[in-house]
Image (spheres, rainbow, N blue to C red):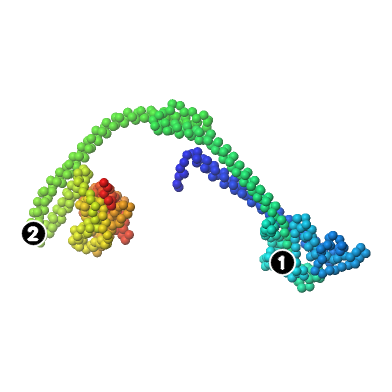
Amino acid sequence: MRAFKGSLQLKFVSAIICIVVPLLGIIFFWQAMAEERQAWTQMINQARVLTQQIILTRQWVSDSQGVFIRQDSPGARGGAGFYSDLLETERGTLQRFTPSMVTKRLSLYSLDQNLYRFRLAGLAPMNPENRPDEFELAAIQSFAQAGSREYYVLDRHNGEAVFQYSAPLFVDEACLSCHKNYTRGTISGCLSIYLPAQHVLDSLSRSRSQLFLSALALIVLTVMTLYFLVRHLVLRPLGRLEAMADGISRGKFPGEMHIGSGDEMDRLGRALQDMSGKLEEGRSRLEEKVRSATGELAKANDELKTLDRLKTEFLATMSHELRSPLTSIRGGLDYLRRTETAADRQDYLQIMDKNLRRLVHLVTDIFDITRIEADKVQWNFMNGDLSELIGEVIDILSQQAEERNVHMRLPAAEPMRACMDMERIEQVLVNLTENAIKYSPPGGTVAFDLVRAGGEIHVRVTDQGPGVPPEDREAIFKKFHTAPSSGRGEKPGGTGLGLAICSQIVRAHGGRIWVEDGAGGGSVFTFTLPETCEG
């Protein structure tokens, strides 16, 4: 997990905000949602009550076969229905109002008071004014198909929010007296109520604004209160402890430290003060021991430098002095191999030649690594073509590869120029290639690859040998560490200096060298060289 960087004060404030803001935000959001649900629940319940009142009124009118109202009364004006049914009485002419006509007159009365309006809609109305609109068609379809008992939506009419509610109307026995084409128990239409909802939305908006301002004020107050408490009880004592610890780290031990909080911080300050005194006492004793040990270490270091110099000089002198007698022995051995014809003696001479080659190789390696470690090598850095150099190494080692039935492959590529000492990099390539040939099975392939990446040239030498265990991949580049057996009953046969010399040469070039597993088995030795010479 990635650490959050910043001062403790910033972390405390961030933690307080991250806890308080979401928590209070959730509480006030839930409160706002609850108020909204309550408002719409009241709106729905109001619509349900009005619907039941209207349906009961219609039921009473229907059960009474209509109601008669004086034709010249205010309640009868504009109440002409689809047909007229008049009754002459001593008090004047009475007109019979059907349930639909009563519903219409009640709707007009409520609309005049700007309260609400409602209307009837039928599937096959006798009055064309009672044809259903889109909302009522959707409601009737919901009643018929889904079996629902109410249907409502929030819509806008003339820029004002309107809550539309609809309930189904079922055909009963009284309805059949006028509507002969209906069937008892079926849905004949619906009763739609239109309630003004703009005041509800405005009230909810004001309530949300008040809740938001209240939440904001409470959040600010809570954060400031908690921050003040944390700063006074935690941050200020910690600041004093930090100053004390910083003084101790710079060797300034305070005499007395008083936090004054009377809690754990105060006890921590006293403990830190005690520790400071003990550290000061311990430092005095340690300085005395260090002064004493420094003189001994300086003397031992001088002795080690002298021994290392003598060792380097001895190895360099020994390897140099051994070259002349080894060259003479090599010449005599070559003469004997040319003049001696007996088969058994030739076998012995061949064994002697093989071991002499190993001895010469060992002496050469010791001479090289001692010169490199003594920084007595004259480097000749220049821009050279690695592709051409690898081709020369393949030519040099082609006979050795043919004897072991190993193929060497270098894909055709454009010239890859790098900054290098040609002779030393050739030594690295020869060493890596000889090892690859040695550990590859008969019929195997040693492959070379050159890749340009990030201002460097990556040189890869891939074999098909047994590979290098992960625990040995760093140790093989140290002196006198030999690789494990190839698995074919052969001993490694190396001096343990070849890869160490390769590592020293590559490091002198400012590069890196490592080994990893090949994709199809074996090992991949990779080293890098800079593309250009600096300076």
**Residue drawn at x 86%, y 65% as measured from the top left:** 95
Q: Which quadrant holds residue 310? A: top left
Q: Nearer the viewer, residue 156 or 20?
A: 156
Res 147 seen here: no
Residue 80 screen position, x and y as percent: 82, 66
Sequence-earlier tag: 2 or 1: 1
x and y percentages locating residue 459 in the rendered image: 28, 55
Residue 83 is situated, as x and y percent measured from the top left of the image, at 82, 69
| Local SS, label 2 | helix
Numbered badge on residue 132: 1
Q: Amino acid at mark 2?
A: Arg
Name the residue nearer the viewer: 71 or 319: 71
Task: Tell me the residue at 28%/49% (across/down).
Answer: 511
Q: Separation of disc 2 and disc 1 at Cα?
A: 123 Å
| Disc assigned to residue 338 | 2
- Is 518 situated above or below 65? above
The local crowd at label 2, few if under 14, some if 14 to 19, many if 20 or more residues have their Cα within 10 Å, is few
Q: Nearer the viewer, residue 104 or 502?
A: 104
